[in-house]
Amino acid sequence: MSLIDKPSPNFNERKGPPDMVVLHYTGMETAKAALDRLLDPDAKVSAHYVVDEDGSVYALVPEERRAWHAGVSYWRGETDINGCSIGVEIVNPGHEFGYRDFPAIQIDAVIGLLDGIRERWDIADSRILGHSDVAPARKEDPGERFPWKTLADHGHGLWVEPDLPPAGAMGPPLGPGDEGLGVFSLQSALGKLGYNVLGGGPYDDETLTIVRAFQRHWLPEVIGTEIEGRADAATRVRLMALLRHITLLEV
Ligand SMILES: [Zn+2]
C-alpha cells in the first residue's frame, strides 16, 4: 500500500504500544477540509491516517506517537483511548453533511491499512472499534453504513450472526423506563463488552445511548427503526454471542 505523507503537528508521546484501533468518519464536506483541519496546529486534532474515498491513504502521525482523535472516551476501564489506540479517519461527509455509503475501494484501503497495522502491533479483534463505541454520548461515527461485516470477513474485528430464538421466547424489547433483572443483565453485558455503563438502575437515557451505539456497530439494520435504542431479542442475542466469542478467545 502506498502512503502519502502529510505530517500533522498534533501529537505527543504514548506511554506504551498501541493495542486498539479506533475508526472514524471525517464528518466534513470534503476530504480537503478534513485534512486541512487535521494538519492545523490550532485545531489540536489529528489521526494517524486518513483514508479518502478513492482509496488514497494519507499518513499524518507516526504510529509510535499519540494522535488526538478520540477525545473524552472509554473502553473496558481505559480512559486514555488516544494513548492506547491508532486512529483512522475515513472520509465521509457523515450524518451532518450527507451520510453516504463507503465506496468498496475505500474499504479495501482500510483493510489493507489494518493488515499492516496488525502486523506491526498486537491488536485483538475485540479492540477494533468505532468512535461511537468509545464515546457513545458524543459520537456517531463511523456510523451504521460502515461495513463492519466486510472488515470481519477480511479478518479484522468481531462480527456475529447468531440464530434468533423463537418469536416471543425472550419477551418484548426492553426500553426506556423498564427495570428489573433483564435490564440489569443487559447493562452488565454491555459493560462486560467494554462500554462505559454502570448499570443497576432502570433503562435510562444512558442505557438507551449505549444500546444505540452497540446497534450502530453490531446490528446496524435497526438504526432508524423503532427498535433503535431498544433492546429486542436480536440485539440481546447478538450481544451475548459477542461476549461468548470474546470469552472463548481469551481462555
Ligand atoms: Zn470520530
Image (cartoon, rainbow, N blue to C red):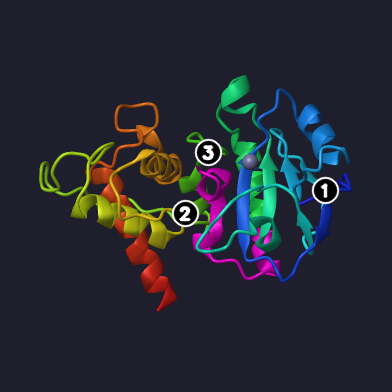
Q: Which residues are magenta?
A: 115-136
Quick check: 204 above or below 251? above
Residue 68 located left or right of residue 142: right
The spot of residue 174 in percent (x, y) is: 23, 41
Task: Say which residue appears at 51% left-offset and 40% top-offset.
Answer: 137
Residue drawn at 44 percent across, 39 percent down: 216
The amino acid beneath tag 1 is Leu
Question: Which residue in the protein does label 2 denote?
Answer: 196
Q: Earlier in the sequence, mark 3 or mark 1?
A: 1
Q: CA distance from mark 3 to mark 1?
A: 22 Å
Where's the C terminus, which quadrant? bottom left
The residue identified by callout 3 is 146
Q: Earlier in the sequence, mark 1 or mark 2?
A: 1
In the image, what residue type sits under mark 2?
Asn
Question: Residue tagged by mark 1?
Answer: 60
Question: Is residue 119 rendered magenta in the image?
Answer: yes
The answer to whether the residues at label 1 and label 2 have Cβ atoms under 8 Å apart is no
Q: What residue type is disc 3 on?
A: Phe
How far is disc 1 from disc 2 in space, using C-alphas? Answer: 29 Å
Compare residues 128 and 188 and report the one nearer the observer: 188
Mark 1 secondary-structure assignment: loop
Could you tell me if residue 88 is visible in this image? yes
Examine the structure image and report whether residue 21 is included in the region drawn in magenta.
no
| Horizontal relation, residue 140 to residue 8: left or right | left
Does mark 2 have its CB less than 8 Å from ligand 1? Answer: no
Instruction: Answer left or right for 230 relative to 112.
Output: left
